[in-house]
Image (cartoon, rainbow, N blue to C red):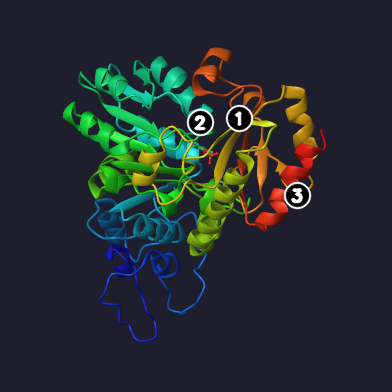
């Protein structure tokens, strides 16, 4: 238990010496949060245990009074999950982290734990469709109002944030159109009216964008996406100050129960070790594909933040370390021909996941964003001719050849 409070969680079982310099993120991704048992295992231990025992009734009572640090029950905390949380917090540069069962559990808990009936939330319109349903259907049933703004318009944000607001929710880049919101500008406006700023950083991952450093208060992830990135488990995480995580979020999760399983945390701990390498390679391939496809005659637009043609290119360069692993492509073709291109792919799979080691293509209008009405889809820039391509770890030449031969098969 003594390791739990060390911010880097660094433990060198051999010499017991911790480094006296600040470690790079790749080092932290392999070493952060490690709590070795007495066996000195190299790989992180999987504590597949729902409960924990106490030396005495008094120790149990003291642990429940928060006077003794002791794991109580895996719905609250678990050693393997705690290792994942500490490792991700170290990579993100956040004071604290709470893991959840899925990205949507992270999104819902991060917002629902800070609002009450009568409160208002301001959010950018372009977002993942389940987040949209939470903000515009589920929370309003409980008396919480959501104001949606055009995320790229400073005037829209300023107008919406001219009165007391409980929370601001930003997805940047947005899924699927890769729209960029100015996190620093919105955070400054939001803090003036007392709002907590929550950023869905799924599309960028911790590797390409650090919202807390830009002024946001809370970052949330679907760990299902780049963090696992190998198509295996669902997971989520919320990161922020120790005060927010321990006093606001943890009680909400402890009592409502969307906790991460120890098994998934164990898988995700290993995924974190390769996160930087995977995202950097996928990002480089996505950039190359975006540049090459932009001039293809069957393509109307390629939306990718690090293309000069992207409407918020300058802003993206300022707040991101790369354009991301995902691009939106609007074909100059009707839907049946877009489907024909997708069906002609031989390497890239048709799948609605993203951030995976396998390249995946989806048609948002008929799948991930189907739940939104036509007007909302149109406002988000999703048309019948739009596809989202999540670029994986394959050789980029194979991906380009696959895309070009599918396009040329028409
Ligand atoms: C996938 C996704 C989520 C939800 O994550 P799950 O792990 O599927 O619950 C939230 N936000 C964005 C931007 C996503 O892409």
Sequence-wise first label, 1 or 3:
3
The response on whether ligand 1 sits within 8 Å of label 2 is: yes
Toward the left, the furthest residue is 192
Residue, disc 3: 347
Q: Is residue 256 visible?
A: no
- Tag 2 residue: 128
**Viewer-side label of 1, 3:** 3
Chain-order first, disc 2 or disc 1:
2
Q: Nearer the viewer, residue 7 or 402?
A: 402
Q: Measured from the top left, where is residue 108 in percent x and y?
A: 42, 33
Q: Residue at x 25, y 77 (%)?
A: 20
Identify the residue at image location x=77%, y=27%: 337
- Which of pointers 3 and 2 indicates the residue nearer the eye? 3
- Identified at 67% across, 39% down, the residue is 361
Q: Residue at x 76, y 29 (%)?
A: 339
Q: As displayed, is residue 26 above or below residue 108?
A: below
Write down the residue under mark 1: 368
Dot 1: element = loop
Expressed as whole percent of the image width and height from the top left, the position of residue 56 reads 32, 63
Q: Position of residue 175 (x, y in %)?
A: 51, 34
Tell me, yes or no, whether the two marked residues, 2 and 1, touch with CB atoms within 8 Å. yes
Q: Could you tell which of marks 3 and 2 lies nearer the N-terminus? A: 2
Query: Is there CB contact under 8 Å for labels 1 and 3?
Result: no
Viewport quadrant of the C terminus: top right
The residues bearing labels 2 and 1 have C-alpha atoms spaced at a distance of 8 Å
Which SS class for mark 2? loop
For residue 377, above or below residue 14: above
Residue 61 in which image quadrant: bottom left
Determine whether, in the image, residue 175 is placed left or right of residue 357.
Answer: left
Question: What crowding class fits label 3: few (fewer than 14 Cα within 10 Å), some (14-19), or many (20 or more)?
Answer: some
> Visible in this render: residue 214?
yes
Q: Is mark 1 within 8 Å of ligand 1?
A: no
């Amino acid at each position: 238990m003594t390791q739990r409070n060390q911010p880097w969680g660094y433990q060198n079982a051999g010499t017991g010496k911790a480094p006296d310099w600040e470690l790079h993120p790749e080092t932290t991704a392999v070493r952060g949060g490690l709590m070795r048992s007495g066996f000195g295992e190299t790989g992180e231990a999987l504590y597949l245990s729902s409960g924990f025992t106490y030396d005495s009734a008094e120790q149990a009572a003291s642990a429940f009074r928060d006077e003794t640090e002791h794991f109580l029950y895996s719905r609250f905390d678990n050693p393997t999950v705690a290792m994942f949380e500490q490792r991700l917090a170290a990579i993100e540069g956040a004071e604290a982290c709470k893991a959840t069962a899925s990205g949507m559990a992270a999104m819902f808990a991060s917002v629902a734990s800070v609002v009450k009936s009568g409160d208002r939330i301001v959010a950018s319109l372009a977002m993942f469709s389940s987040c949209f349903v939470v903000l515009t259907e589920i929370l309003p049933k409980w008396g919480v109002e959501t104001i949606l703004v055009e995320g790229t318009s400073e005037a829209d944000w300023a107008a919406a944030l001219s009165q007391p607001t409980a929370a601001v929710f930003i997805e940047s880049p947005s899924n699927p159109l890769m729209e960029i919101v100015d996190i620093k500008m919105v955070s400054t406006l939001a803090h003036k009216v007392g709002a907590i700023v929550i950023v869905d950083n799924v599309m960028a991952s911790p590797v390409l964008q650090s919202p807390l450093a830009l002024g946001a208060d809370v970052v949330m992830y679907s760990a299902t996406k780049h963090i696992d990135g190998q198509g295996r488990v669902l997971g989520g995480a919320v990161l922020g100050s120790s005060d927010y995580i321990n006093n606001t979020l943890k009680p909400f999760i402890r009592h409502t129960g969307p906790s991460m399983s120890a098994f998934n945390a164990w898988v995700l701990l290993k995924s974190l070790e390769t996160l930087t390498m995977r995202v950097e390679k996928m990002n480089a391939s996505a950039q190359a594909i975006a540049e090459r496809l932009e001039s293809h005659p069957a393509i109307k637009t390629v939306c990718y933040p690090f293309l000069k043609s992207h409407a918020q290119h300058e802003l993206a360069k300022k707040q991101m370390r790369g354009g991301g692993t995902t691009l939106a492509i609007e074909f100059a073709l009707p839907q049946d021909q877009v489907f024909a291109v997708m069906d002609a792919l031989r390497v890239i799979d048709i799948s609605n996941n993203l951030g995976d080691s396998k390249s995946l293509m989806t048609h948002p209008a008929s799948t991930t964003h189907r739940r939104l009405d036509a007007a909302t889809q149109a406002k988000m820039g999703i048309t019948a001719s739009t596809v989202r391509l999540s670029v994986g770890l394959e050789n980029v030449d194979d991906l380009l050849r696959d895309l070009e031969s599918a396009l040329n098969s028409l």
